[in-house]
Amino acid sequence: MTSLISTEKSLTLFPLSQWQTATWNDYITYRDTIEDQRIKLYYYANKLLIQMGKEGINDTSINDLFTMILFIWFSNHPEIPMNSFGGVLLEKEAKRSASPDLVVYLGENYPKWKPGESRYINLDKWPVPNLVGEISDTTLSSDLDEKKHLYADLGIPEYWVIDVQGKRVFCFQLQTNGNYQESEVSLVLKGLPIALLVETIKRLENETNSRAANWFSQEILKLETETK
């Protein structure tokens, strides 16, 4: 395979706004050269995507909102051990890599870093996350296409796409055939209605993300009371 970006000059040309043909060695070169922690790397099907991370007000506000949502939800379900690694690089040696905005592990078998080890999550050593998510402002088409296939191929059980501009949340569940199917509830969050996440996002039009998170907290208490 001929790489389109494997030149020394190309190292100064990131981010790449579109997926481009690349080798795994190209990916390694970028991974080990780029020091800007905002850069997000994706490698799938012999193609590389390099994106800037959360920069805009909407991106960061919604990202922090979902961090609060996860904290609130699992604080109300302390019986479920949860670890969050938002923005960390996931890597399957010589095959795939991704930098999702949300990364959730349930249970006690979650990645633990030791001095001298690489700081990304090695999926040849650790299990895949139970849930990953992308905060989509200008990246929606890729998040619903290539990245969706990438996460399904990695075998990640649940994938969220949070559409910043459209104020939507897509929740995909991995099926036995290896493909994602959209769902109206989260299985990782024990049947949480996705519609409640959508309503929480919409509240950002008129209030802060902390107040939206507080509203979410009150709503899940109501929901759990109704289901008992």
Image (tube, grey):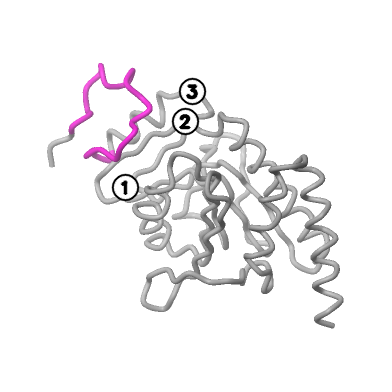
- Above or below, 182 against 15 in this view is below
Mark 1 vs mark 2, foreground winner is 2
Q: CA distance from mark 1 to mark 3?
A: 21 Å
Of the residues tagged 1 and 3, which is closer to the observer?
3
Q: Which residue is mark 3?
A: 35
Instruction: Name the N-terminal-most of marks 1 and 3.
Output: 3
> Camera-side residue: 205 or 133?
205
Pointer 3 or 2: first along the chain:
3
What percent of the width, then of the height, locates residue 180?
A: 42, 68
Residue 171: x, y in percent?
A: 53, 64
Disc 3 element: loop
Along the polypeptide, which appears first: circle 1 or circle 2?
2
Query: Callout 1: 10 Å neighbours few (<14), some, many (20+)?
Result: some
Between 213 and 187, the one lying in front of the other is 213
Q: Residue at x 52, y 29 (%)?
A: 38
Q: Amino acid at mark 2?
A: Met
The residue at the point 75 percent across, 48 percent down is: 68
Q: Is residue 203 above or below residue 12?
A: below
Q: Which residues are magenta?
A: 4-24
Measured along the vertical axis of the image, is residue 72 above or below residue 78? Answer: above
Q: Which mark is residue 52?
A: 2
Disc 1 marks which residue?
Answer: 94
- Location of the N terminus by quadrant is top left
Task: Tell whether position 162 is magenta.
Answer: no
Helix, strand or loop at label 1? It is loop
* Amino acid type of the residue that numbered disc 1 sits on in the rendered structure: Ala
Q: Choose between 95 and 220: the one closer to the eye.
A: 220
Q: CA distance from mark 3 to mark 2?
A: 12 Å
